[in-house]
Image: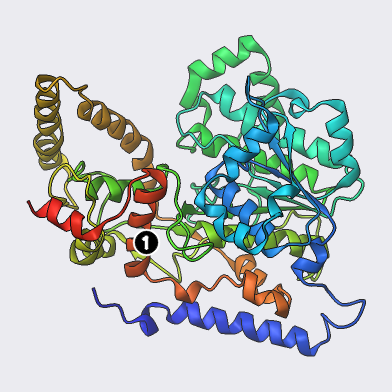
Protein backbone atom coordinates (compact mmCIF):
# COMPACT_ATOMS: atom_id res chain seq x y z
CA UNK A 1 0.00 0.00 0.00
CA UNK A 2 1.32 3.44 -0.95
CA UNK A 3 1.15 6.20 1.67
CA UNK A 4 2.55 9.67 1.00
CA UNK A 5 4.00 10.27 4.46
CA UNK A 6 4.54 13.98 3.75
CA UNK A 7 0.79 14.33 3.36
CA UNK A 8 -0.25 11.67 5.89
CA UNK A 9 1.94 13.14 8.65
CA UNK A 10 1.63 16.77 7.57
CA UNK A 11 -0.16 17.94 10.72
CA UNK A 12 1.96 15.69 12.94
CA UNK A 13 5.16 17.23 11.56
CA UNK A 14 3.77 20.73 12.03
CA UNK A 15 3.12 20.00 15.71
CA UNK A 16 6.55 18.43 16.05
CA UNK A 17 8.11 21.63 14.72
CA UNK A 18 6.11 23.73 17.18
CA UNK A 19 7.29 21.53 20.07
CA UNK A 20 10.90 21.78 18.93
CA UNK A 21 10.63 25.55 18.50
CA UNK A 22 9.10 25.85 21.97
CA UNK A 23 11.91 23.80 23.47
CA UNK A 24 14.52 25.90 21.64
CA UNK A 25 12.89 29.09 22.96
CA UNK A 26 13.12 27.75 26.50
CA UNK A 27 16.81 26.99 25.97
CA UNK A 28 17.40 30.53 24.73
CA UNK A 29 15.50 31.83 27.75
CA UNK A 30 17.87 30.03 30.11
CA UNK A 31 15.17 27.82 31.64
CA UNK A 32 17.60 24.93 31.95
CA UNK A 33 20.72 26.95 32.89
CA UNK A 34 22.63 27.00 36.14
CA UNK A 35 21.81 25.55 39.53
CA UNK A 36 18.35 27.15 39.49
CA UNK A 37 17.58 25.74 36.04
CA UNK A 38 15.31 22.79 35.45
CA UNK A 39 17.19 19.47 35.51
CA UNK A 40 16.82 16.56 33.07
CA UNK A 41 14.49 13.71 33.96
CA UNK A 42 17.46 11.48 34.75
CA UNK A 43 18.98 14.03 37.15
CA UNK A 44 15.66 14.77 38.85
CA UNK A 45 15.08 11.10 39.61
CA UNK A 46 18.62 10.16 40.55
CA UNK A 47 18.98 8.84 44.09
CA UNK A 48 15.21 8.75 44.63
CA UNK A 49 12.73 5.99 45.38
CA UNK A 50 9.78 5.15 43.15
CA UNK A 51 6.56 3.22 43.76
CA UNK A 52 4.85 1.46 40.85
CA UNK A 53 1.46 -0.24 41.07
CA UNK A 54 0.30 -2.51 38.28
CA UNK A 55 3.84 -3.52 37.36
CA UNK A 56 2.74 -7.03 36.38
CA UNK A 57 0.46 -5.69 33.64
CA UNK A 58 1.30 -5.01 30.01
CA UNK A 59 1.82 -1.24 30.36
CA UNK A 60 3.27 -1.59 33.86
CA UNK A 61 6.07 -3.87 32.70
CA UNK A 62 7.03 -1.54 29.84
CA UNK A 63 6.94 1.46 32.18
CA UNK A 64 9.14 -0.39 34.66
CA UNK A 65 11.69 -1.33 31.98
CA UNK A 66 11.82 2.23 30.66
CA UNK A 67 12.28 3.68 34.14
CA UNK A 68 15.21 1.39 34.89
CA UNK A 69 16.86 1.75 31.48
CA UNK A 70 16.51 5.50 30.95
CA UNK A 71 16.70 6.65 34.58
CA UNK A 72 19.68 4.57 35.79
CA UNK A 73 20.18 6.78 38.84
CA UNK A 74 16.90 5.75 40.44
CA UNK A 75 17.71 4.26 43.85
CA UNK A 76 14.84 1.85 44.56
CA UNK A 77 11.71 0.87 42.69
CA UNK A 78 9.04 -0.55 44.98
CA UNK A 79 6.50 -2.83 43.30
CA UNK A 80 3.15 -3.20 45.02
CA UNK A 81 2.24 -6.85 44.33
CA UNK A 82 -0.62 -9.02 45.52
CA UNK A 83 0.64 -11.86 47.74
CA UNK A 84 0.31 -15.34 46.28
CA UNK A 85 0.18 -18.38 48.49
CA UNK A 86 3.44 -20.30 48.32
CA UNK A 87 5.16 -17.68 46.15
CA UNK A 88 7.83 -15.52 47.77
CA UNK A 89 7.86 -11.78 46.94
CA UNK A 90 11.25 -12.14 45.27
CA UNK A 91 9.80 -14.82 42.99
CA UNK A 92 6.93 -12.50 42.07
CA UNK A 93 9.49 -9.94 40.90
CA UNK A 94 11.39 -12.57 38.91
CA UNK A 95 8.17 -13.62 37.21
CA UNK A 96 7.61 -10.03 36.06
CA UNK A 97 11.11 -9.44 34.69
CA UNK A 98 11.88 -12.91 33.34
CA UNK A 99 10.81 -11.97 29.81
CA UNK A 100 12.65 -10.74 26.73
CA UNK A 101 11.43 -7.20 27.37
CA UNK A 102 14.24 -6.75 29.89
CA UNK A 103 17.07 -8.26 27.82
CA UNK A 104 18.45 -4.94 26.55
CA UNK A 105 18.32 -3.45 30.04
CA UNK A 106 20.36 -6.32 31.46
CA UNK A 107 22.97 -5.93 28.72
CA UNK A 108 23.34 -2.22 29.46
CA UNK A 109 22.91 -2.42 33.25
CA UNK A 110 23.45 -5.97 34.54
CA UNK A 111 22.57 -5.06 38.14
CA UNK A 112 19.50 -2.91 37.37
CA UNK A 113 17.03 -5.48 38.65
CA UNK A 114 18.65 -5.34 42.09
CA UNK A 115 16.80 -2.04 42.56
CA UNK A 116 13.41 -3.78 42.51
CA UNK A 117 11.77 -4.41 45.87
CA UNK A 118 8.47 -6.26 46.18
CA UNK A 119 5.96 -4.88 48.67
CA UNK A 120 3.08 -7.18 49.56
CA UNK A 121 -0.19 -5.37 49.07
CA UNK A 122 -3.50 -5.32 47.21
CA UNK A 123 -5.15 -2.20 45.81
CA UNK A 124 -8.58 -3.81 46.27
CA UNK A 125 -8.08 -4.12 50.04
CA UNK A 126 -8.50 -1.49 52.76
CA UNK A 127 -5.22 0.27 53.42
CA UNK A 128 -3.91 -1.39 50.23
CA UNK A 129 -3.34 -4.48 52.38
CA UNK A 130 0.00 -3.04 53.50
CA UNK A 131 1.86 -4.10 56.60
CA UNK A 132 2.57 -1.21 58.99
CA UNK A 133 6.34 -1.40 58.45
CA UNK A 134 5.98 -1.35 54.65
CA UNK A 135 3.61 1.61 54.80
CA UNK A 136 6.05 3.48 57.00
CA UNK A 137 8.98 2.78 54.69
CA UNK A 138 7.12 3.93 51.60
CA UNK A 139 5.97 7.13 53.28
CA UNK A 140 9.48 7.92 54.46
CA UNK A 141 11.30 7.38 51.17
CA UNK A 142 9.17 7.46 48.01
CA UNK A 143 9.35 10.54 45.77
CA UNK A 144 7.51 9.38 42.61
CA UNK A 145 4.40 7.23 42.35
CA UNK A 146 3.03 5.71 39.15
CA UNK A 147 -0.41 4.26 39.79
CA UNK A 148 -1.39 1.82 37.05
CA UNK A 149 -3.01 -1.00 39.01
CA UNK A 150 -6.51 -1.61 37.68
CA UNK A 151 -8.92 -4.24 36.54
CA UNK A 152 -9.24 -3.74 32.79
CA UNK A 153 -11.97 -6.33 32.31
CA UNK A 154 -15.14 -4.90 30.81
CA UNK A 155 -17.40 -7.54 32.39
CA UNK A 156 -16.37 -7.20 36.03
CA UNK A 157 -19.21 -6.85 38.55
CA UNK A 158 -19.69 -3.29 39.80
CA UNK A 159 -18.33 -4.26 43.21
CA UNK A 160 -15.05 -5.68 41.93
CA UNK A 161 -14.37 -2.84 39.49
CA UNK A 162 -15.09 -0.11 42.04
CA UNK A 163 -13.12 -1.72 44.87
CA UNK A 164 -9.98 -1.84 42.73
CA UNK A 165 -10.30 1.07 40.31
CA UNK A 166 -12.01 3.60 42.59
CA UNK A 167 -11.52 2.71 46.23
CA UNK A 168 -8.01 1.45 45.46
CA UNK A 169 -7.21 4.86 43.97
CA UNK A 170 -8.47 6.54 47.15
CA UNK A 171 -6.41 4.19 49.32
CA UNK A 172 -3.32 5.02 47.25
CA UNK A 173 -3.99 8.76 47.61
CA UNK A 174 -4.24 8.25 51.38
CA UNK A 175 -0.87 6.49 51.33
CA UNK A 176 0.65 9.32 49.28
CA UNK A 177 -0.76 11.93 51.66
CA UNK A 178 1.72 10.67 54.24
CA UNK A 179 4.74 10.68 51.90
CA UNK A 180 7.16 13.30 53.18
CA UNK A 181 9.25 13.35 49.98
CA UNK A 182 6.51 13.05 47.34
CA UNK A 183 7.19 15.04 44.17
CA UNK A 184 4.68 13.57 41.73
CA UNK A 185 1.76 11.14 41.73
CA UNK A 186 0.94 9.99 38.19
CA UNK A 187 -2.48 8.36 37.86
CA UNK A 188 -2.94 6.25 34.73
CA UNK A 189 -6.57 6.44 33.64
CA UNK A 190 -8.10 5.87 30.18
CA UNK A 191 -9.11 8.18 27.34
CA UNK A 192 -12.59 6.64 27.38
CA UNK A 193 -13.91 7.84 30.75
CA UNK A 194 -16.06 10.47 29.02
CA UNK A 195 -17.35 8.90 25.83
CA UNK A 196 -20.53 10.99 26.04
CA UNK A 197 -18.46 13.95 24.82
CA UNK A 198 -17.95 14.73 21.14
CA UNK A 199 -14.50 16.06 21.98
CA UNK A 200 -12.84 15.05 25.25
CA UNK A 201 -10.83 17.93 26.66
CA UNK A 202 -7.86 17.64 28.99
CA UNK A 203 -9.87 18.33 32.10
CA UNK A 204 -12.06 16.55 34.64
CA UNK A 205 -15.74 16.03 33.88
CA UNK A 206 -18.41 15.57 36.55
CA UNK A 207 -19.77 12.07 37.14
CA UNK A 208 -23.45 11.27 37.57
CA UNK A 209 -22.74 9.49 40.88
CA UNK A 210 -20.54 10.61 43.76
CA UNK A 211 -17.53 8.36 44.16
CA UNK A 212 -17.81 8.31 47.95
CA UNK A 213 -21.39 7.07 47.83
CA UNK A 214 -20.50 4.34 45.33
CA UNK A 215 -17.47 3.20 47.33
CA UNK A 216 -19.50 3.16 50.53
CA UNK A 217 -22.20 1.10 48.82
CA UNK A 218 -19.88 -1.59 47.43
CA UNK A 219 -18.02 -1.81 50.74
CA UNK A 220 -21.18 -3.22 52.33
CA UNK A 221 -21.90 -6.83 51.30
CA UNK A 222 -25.67 -6.34 51.15
CA UNK A 223 -25.69 -3.21 49.01
CA UNK A 224 -22.83 -4.59 46.92
CA UNK A 225 -25.02 -7.53 45.91
CA UNK A 226 -27.81 -5.15 44.94
CA UNK A 227 -25.42 -3.04 42.85
CA UNK A 228 -24.03 -6.11 41.10
CA UNK A 229 -27.60 -7.16 40.30
CA UNK A 230 -28.50 -3.73 38.94
CA UNK A 231 -25.31 -3.77 36.89
CA UNK A 232 -25.57 -1.58 33.81
CA UNK A 233 -28.56 0.35 35.16
CA UNK A 234 -26.09 2.16 37.43
CA UNK A 235 -23.56 3.01 34.75
CA UNK A 236 -25.28 5.88 32.99
CA UNK A 237 -23.63 6.50 29.62
CA UNK A 238 -20.74 4.17 30.44
CA UNK A 239 -20.68 0.95 28.38
CA UNK A 240 -19.03 -1.12 31.10
CA UNK A 241 -17.86 -1.15 34.69
CA UNK A 242 -14.27 -0.43 33.64
CA UNK A 243 -14.85 3.08 32.26
CA UNK A 244 -17.42 3.74 35.01
CA UNK A 245 -15.00 2.91 37.84
CA UNK A 246 -12.07 4.68 36.14
CA UNK A 247 -14.14 7.86 35.78
CA UNK A 248 -14.89 7.72 39.50
CA UNK A 249 -11.17 7.16 40.11
CA UNK A 250 -10.42 10.42 38.32
CA UNK A 251 -12.77 12.20 40.74
CA UNK A 252 -10.79 10.71 43.61
CA UNK A 253 -7.60 12.13 42.14
CA UNK A 254 -9.22 15.50 41.57
CA UNK A 255 -9.85 15.75 45.32
CA UNK A 256 -6.37 14.46 46.14
CA UNK A 257 -4.88 17.13 43.87
CA UNK A 258 -5.93 19.78 46.37
CA UNK A 259 -3.01 18.77 48.57
CA UNK A 260 -0.93 16.35 46.44
CA UNK A 261 1.13 16.85 43.23
CA UNK A 262 -1.22 14.78 41.04
CA UNK A 263 -1.27 14.48 37.27
CA UNK A 264 -3.64 12.23 35.29
CA UNK A 265 -2.66 10.59 32.02
CA UNK A 266 -5.34 9.13 29.75
CA UNK A 267 -3.95 6.78 27.10
CA UNK A 268 -6.19 5.69 24.24
CA UNK A 269 -6.09 2.08 22.97
CA UNK A 270 -2.67 0.78 24.01
CA UNK A 271 -0.99 -1.51 21.46
CA UNK A 272 2.44 -3.13 21.10
CA UNK A 273 5.68 -1.19 21.14
CA UNK A 274 6.67 0.93 18.17
CA UNK A 275 10.41 1.00 18.92
CA UNK A 276 11.43 0.39 22.55
CA UNK A 277 13.00 -1.68 23.73
CA UNK A 278 12.31 -3.31 20.36
CA UNK A 279 9.48 -3.08 17.83
CA UNK A 280 6.39 -5.20 18.36
CA UNK A 281 6.71 -6.10 22.05
CA UNK A 282 3.24 -7.35 22.96
CA UNK A 283 2.75 -10.04 25.59
CA UNK A 284 -1.03 -9.83 25.96
CA UNK A 285 -3.98 -10.94 23.87
CA UNK A 286 -6.05 -8.05 25.28
CA UNK A 287 -5.11 -5.89 22.32
CA UNK A 288 -6.57 -4.96 18.92
CA UNK A 289 -3.67 -6.94 17.46
CA UNK A 290 -5.38 -10.07 18.80
CA UNK A 291 -8.20 -9.60 16.29
CA UNK A 292 -5.78 -9.41 13.39
CA UNK A 293 -3.78 -12.32 14.79
CA UNK A 294 -6.98 -14.38 14.83
CA UNK A 295 -7.59 -13.34 11.23
CA UNK A 296 -4.02 -14.27 10.33
CA UNK A 297 -4.50 -17.69 11.95
CA UNK A 298 -7.58 -18.25 9.80
CA UNK A 299 -9.82 -18.36 12.86
CA UNK A 300 -11.83 -15.24 11.97
CA UNK A 301 -13.08 -14.19 8.54
CA UNK A 302 -15.81 -11.72 9.46
CA UNK A 303 -16.20 -9.56 12.55
CA UNK A 304 -18.37 -6.73 13.77
CA UNK A 305 -15.19 -5.21 15.22
CA UNK A 306 -13.71 -4.46 11.80
CA UNK A 307 -15.31 -1.82 9.61
CA UNK A 308 -13.71 0.26 6.88
CA UNK A 309 -15.46 3.36 8.28
CA UNK A 310 -14.15 3.22 11.85
CA UNK A 311 -10.94 4.84 13.09
CA UNK A 312 -9.64 3.64 16.43
CA UNK A 313 -7.04 5.60 18.37
CA UNK A 314 -4.00 3.35 18.79
CA UNK A 315 -1.15 4.33 21.11
CA UNK A 316 2.06 2.27 21.14
CA UNK A 317 2.87 1.19 24.67
CA UNK A 318 6.41 2.56 24.62
CA UNK A 319 5.12 6.06 23.77
CA UNK A 320 2.62 5.81 26.64
CA UNK A 321 5.44 4.78 29.01
CA UNK A 322 7.59 7.72 27.92
CA UNK A 323 4.69 10.12 28.28
CA UNK A 324 3.87 8.80 31.74
CA UNK A 325 7.43 9.37 32.97
CA UNK A 326 7.62 12.83 31.39
CA UNK A 327 4.24 13.73 32.90
CA UNK A 328 5.66 12.95 36.34
CA UNK A 329 8.70 15.08 35.58
CA UNK A 330 6.55 18.01 34.44
CA UNK A 331 4.36 17.77 37.55
CA UNK A 332 7.35 17.52 39.87
CA UNK A 333 9.07 20.55 38.38
CA UNK A 334 5.69 22.29 37.93
CA UNK A 335 6.86 23.99 34.76
CA UNK A 336 4.70 24.62 31.76
CA UNK A 337 1.84 25.85 33.99
CA UNK A 338 1.58 29.63 33.79
CA UNK A 339 -0.90 29.71 36.64
CA UNK A 340 -2.13 27.19 39.13
CA UNK A 341 -5.94 27.34 39.11
CA UNK A 342 -6.22 24.38 41.44
CA UNK A 343 -7.38 22.03 38.68
CA UNK A 344 -5.68 18.68 38.37
CA UNK A 345 -3.58 18.58 35.18
CA UNK A 346 -4.76 16.00 32.65
CA UNK A 347 -2.94 14.62 29.60
CA UNK A 348 -4.92 12.92 26.82
CA UNK A 349 -2.57 10.49 25.07
CA UNK A 350 -4.21 10.15 21.68
CA UNK A 351 -2.97 10.64 18.12
CA UNK A 352 -5.83 9.86 15.73
CA UNK A 353 -5.99 13.48 14.58
CA UNK A 354 -2.37 13.33 13.38
CA UNK A 355 -1.93 9.60 12.71
CA UNK A 356 -5.29 8.16 11.66
CA UNK A 357 -5.52 4.42 11.00
CA UNK A 358 -9.02 3.77 9.62
CA UNK A 359 -10.42 0.29 9.12
CA UNK A 360 -10.08 0.38 5.33
CA UNK A 361 -6.36 1.08 5.72
CA UNK A 362 -5.89 -1.83 8.13
CA UNK A 363 -7.73 -4.15 5.75
CA UNK A 364 -5.65 -3.06 2.76
CA UNK A 365 -2.38 -3.33 4.68
CA UNK A 366 -3.29 -6.82 5.86
CA UNK A 367 -4.41 -8.09 2.46
CA UNK A 368 -1.59 -6.52 0.45
CA UNK A 369 1.37 -7.03 2.73
CA UNK A 370 0.91 -8.45 6.24
CA UNK A 371 -0.80 -11.70 5.24
CA UNK A 372 2.21 -12.91 3.27
CA UNK A 373 4.88 -10.91 5.11
CA UNK A 374 3.95 -12.43 8.48
CA UNK A 375 2.36 -15.83 7.73
CA UNK A 376 1.65 -18.00 10.76
CA UNK A 377 2.77 -21.62 10.73
CA UNK A 378 -0.12 -22.31 13.11
CA UNK A 379 -2.83 -20.97 10.78
CA UNK A 380 -5.75 -23.42 10.61
CA UNK A 381 -6.77 -22.32 7.10
CA UNK A 382 -5.84 -19.68 4.54
CA UNK A 383 -6.31 -16.23 6.11
CA UNK A 384 -8.87 -13.97 4.47
CA UNK A 385 -11.17 -11.27 5.76
CA UNK A 386 -14.33 -9.45 4.76
CA UNK A 387 -15.21 -6.00 6.14
CA UNK A 388 -18.44 -3.99 6.14
CA UNK A 389 -20.55 -7.10 6.53
CA UNK A 390 -23.72 -6.56 8.56
CA UNK A 391 -27.30 -7.66 9.01
CA UNK A 392 -28.46 -10.97 7.53
CA UNK A 393 -25.29 -11.32 5.45
CA UNK A 394 -23.13 -11.12 8.59
CA UNK A 395 -25.26 -13.77 10.32
CA UNK A 396 -24.97 -16.04 7.27
CA UNK A 397 -21.19 -15.63 6.88
CA UNK A 398 -20.61 -15.93 10.63
CA UNK A 399 -22.51 -19.22 10.62
CA UNK A 400 -20.72 -20.53 7.53
CA UNK A 401 -17.15 -19.35 8.29
CA UNK A 402 -17.19 -19.81 12.05
CA UNK A 403 -19.96 -21.92 13.58
CA UNK A 404 -20.12 -24.55 10.84
CA UNK A 405 -16.34 -24.59 10.43
CA UNK A 406 -15.87 -24.82 14.21
CA UNK A 407 -18.36 -27.69 14.49
CA UNK A 408 -16.66 -29.61 11.67
CA UNK A 409 -13.20 -29.01 13.11
CA UNK A 410 -14.21 -30.06 16.62
CA UNK A 411 -15.89 -33.16 15.22
CA UNK A 412 -12.67 -34.09 13.43
CA UNK A 413 -10.73 -33.55 16.65
CA UNK A 414 -13.10 -35.80 18.58
CA UNK A 415 -12.79 -38.54 15.96
CA UNK A 416 -9.00 -38.22 16.19
CA UNK A 417 -9.15 -38.60 19.96
CA UNK A 418 -8.29 -34.96 20.66
CA UNK A 419 -10.09 -32.39 22.77
CA UNK A 420 -12.48 -30.13 20.80
CA UNK A 421 -11.72 -26.46 21.26
CA UNK A 422 -12.69 -24.27 18.31
CA UNK A 423 -16.36 -23.72 19.17
CA UNK A 424 -15.25 -22.67 22.65
CA UNK A 425 -12.93 -20.12 21.03
CA UNK A 426 -15.80 -18.76 18.94
CA UNK A 427 -18.01 -18.45 22.01
CA UNK A 428 -15.33 -16.40 23.77
CA UNK A 429 -14.87 -14.26 20.67
CA UNK A 430 -18.61 -13.60 20.56
CA UNK A 431 -18.58 -12.38 24.16
CA UNK A 432 -15.55 -10.16 23.53
CA UNK A 433 -17.11 -8.77 20.35
CA UNK A 434 -20.28 -7.86 22.20
CA UNK A 435 -18.29 -5.99 24.86
CA UNK A 436 -16.12 -4.09 22.39
CA UNK A 437 -18.66 -3.36 19.65
CA UNK A 438 -19.99 -0.29 21.47
CA UNK A 439 -16.66 1.49 20.97
CA UNK A 440 -16.90 1.06 17.19
CA UNK A 441 -19.81 3.48 16.98
CA UNK A 442 -17.92 6.20 18.82
CA UNK A 443 -17.23 9.35 16.89
CA UNK A 444 -15.09 10.97 19.50
CA UNK A 445 -12.15 13.34 19.37
CA UNK A 446 -9.52 14.30 21.91
CA UNK A 447 -7.89 17.60 22.75
CA UNK A 448 -4.18 16.86 23.14
CA UNK A 449 -2.57 20.22 23.88
CA UNK A 450 -0.97 18.97 27.10
CA UNK A 451 0.25 15.80 25.38
CA UNK A 452 2.19 17.85 22.84
CA UNK A 453 3.27 20.23 25.58
CA UNK A 454 5.17 17.37 27.21
CA UNK A 455 7.49 17.28 24.22
CA UNK A 456 8.15 20.99 24.45
CA UNK A 457 8.90 20.87 28.16
CA UNK A 458 11.49 18.09 28.27
CA UNK A 459 15.12 18.98 28.87
CA UNK A 460 17.27 19.06 25.68
CA UNK A 461 19.42 16.24 27.04
CA UNK A 462 16.29 14.09 27.50
CA UNK A 463 15.30 14.21 23.83
CA UNK A 464 17.24 11.06 22.99
CA UNK A 465 15.44 8.96 25.62
CA UNK A 466 12.05 10.65 25.93
CA UNK A 467 11.13 12.18 22.59
CA UNK A 468 7.95 10.45 21.38
CA UNK A 469 9.32 10.17 17.83
CA UNK A 470 5.79 10.00 16.43
CA UNK A 471 6.96 10.71 12.89
CA UNK A 472 8.61 7.27 12.80
CA UNK A 473 5.19 5.60 13.05
CA UNK A 474 4.08 3.93 9.82
CA UNK A 475 0.94 1.73 9.70
CA UNK A 476 2.52 -0.63 7.16
CA UNK A 477 5.63 -1.32 9.21
CA UNK A 478 3.85 -1.20 12.55
CA UNK A 479 1.13 -3.61 11.39
CA UNK A 480 3.72 -6.25 10.57
CA UNK A 481 5.50 -5.69 13.88
CA UNK A 482 2.24 -6.07 15.83
CA UNK A 483 1.42 -9.37 14.11
CA UNK A 484 4.93 -10.68 14.66
CA UNK A 485 5.08 -9.44 18.26
CA UNK A 486 1.83 -11.03 19.42
CA UNK A 487 2.84 -14.30 17.77
CA UNK A 488 6.23 -14.49 19.48
CA UNK A 489 5.56 -12.87 22.88
CA UNK A 490 1.88 -13.58 23.59
CA UNK A 491 1.41 -16.89 21.77
CA UNK A 492 5.03 -18.02 22.34
CA UNK A 493 5.34 -19.25 18.77
CA UNK A 494 8.46 -18.94 16.66
CA UNK A 495 8.17 -16.91 13.46
CA UNK A 496 9.42 -18.61 10.29
CA UNK A 497 8.28 -16.83 7.14
CA UNK A 498 9.28 -19.45 4.59
CA UNK A 499 7.64 -22.24 6.56
CA UNK A 500 4.59 -20.05 7.14
CA UNK A 501 4.17 -19.32 3.42
CA UNK A 502 4.35 -23.01 2.59
CA UNK A 503 1.82 -23.75 5.35
CA UNK A 504 -0.88 -21.29 4.27
CA UNK A 505 -0.42 -22.06 0.55
CA UNK A 506 -0.79 -25.81 0.85
| Quadrant in the picture for residue 52 | top right
Q: On the image, numbered disc 1 is attached to which residue?
A: 481
Depth check: 367 or 279 in front?
A: 279
Give the structural element (helix, strand or loop) at label 1: helix
Q: Left or right of 59: which side holds 180?
A: right
Q: Residues within 10 Å of mark 1 (few under 14, many from 20)?
A: many
Q: Is residue 330 visible?
A: yes
Depth check: 500 or 172 in front?
A: 500
**Residue at the bottom extreme, as displayed:** 28
Q: Vertical placement of 483 versus 352: above or below?
A: above
Residue at screen point 61% across, 68% down: 449
Q: Vertical placement of 445 versus 240: above or below?
A: below
Q: Vertical placement of 471 versus 129: above or below?
A: below
| Quadrant in the picture for residue 329 | bottom right
Spot occupied by residue 144 in the image (x, y as percentages of width and height)? 78, 52
Residue at screen point 55% across, 18% down: 227
Spot occupied by residue 336 in the image (x, y as percentages of width and height)? 76, 71
Depth check: 269 or 297 in front?
A: 297
Q: Left or right of 201: which side holds 89?
A: right
| Number of disc labels | 1
Residue at screen point 82% across, 36% down: 175
**Residue at the top extreme, as displayed:** 222
Q: Can residue 349 be seen in this view?
A: no
Q: In which quarter of the image is the N terminus?
A: bottom left
Residue at screen point 13% across, 52% down: 504
Q: Vertical placement of 152 versus 456: above or below?
A: above
Amino acid sequence: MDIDMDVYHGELRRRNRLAEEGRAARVRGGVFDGEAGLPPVTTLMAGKDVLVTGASGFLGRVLLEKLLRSCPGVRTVFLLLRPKRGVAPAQRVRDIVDVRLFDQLLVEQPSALDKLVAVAGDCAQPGLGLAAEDRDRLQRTVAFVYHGAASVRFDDPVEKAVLLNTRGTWELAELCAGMARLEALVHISTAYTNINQDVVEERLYPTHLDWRLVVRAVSDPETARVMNTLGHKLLGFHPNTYTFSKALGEQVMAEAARHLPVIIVRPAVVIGAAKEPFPGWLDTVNSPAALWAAINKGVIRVSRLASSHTTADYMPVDIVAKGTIVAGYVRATNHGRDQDDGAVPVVNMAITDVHPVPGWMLEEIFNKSCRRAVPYCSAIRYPMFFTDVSGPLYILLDFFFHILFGFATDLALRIGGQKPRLLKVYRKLAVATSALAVFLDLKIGFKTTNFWELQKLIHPSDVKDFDFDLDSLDPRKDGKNQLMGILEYAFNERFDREKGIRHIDR
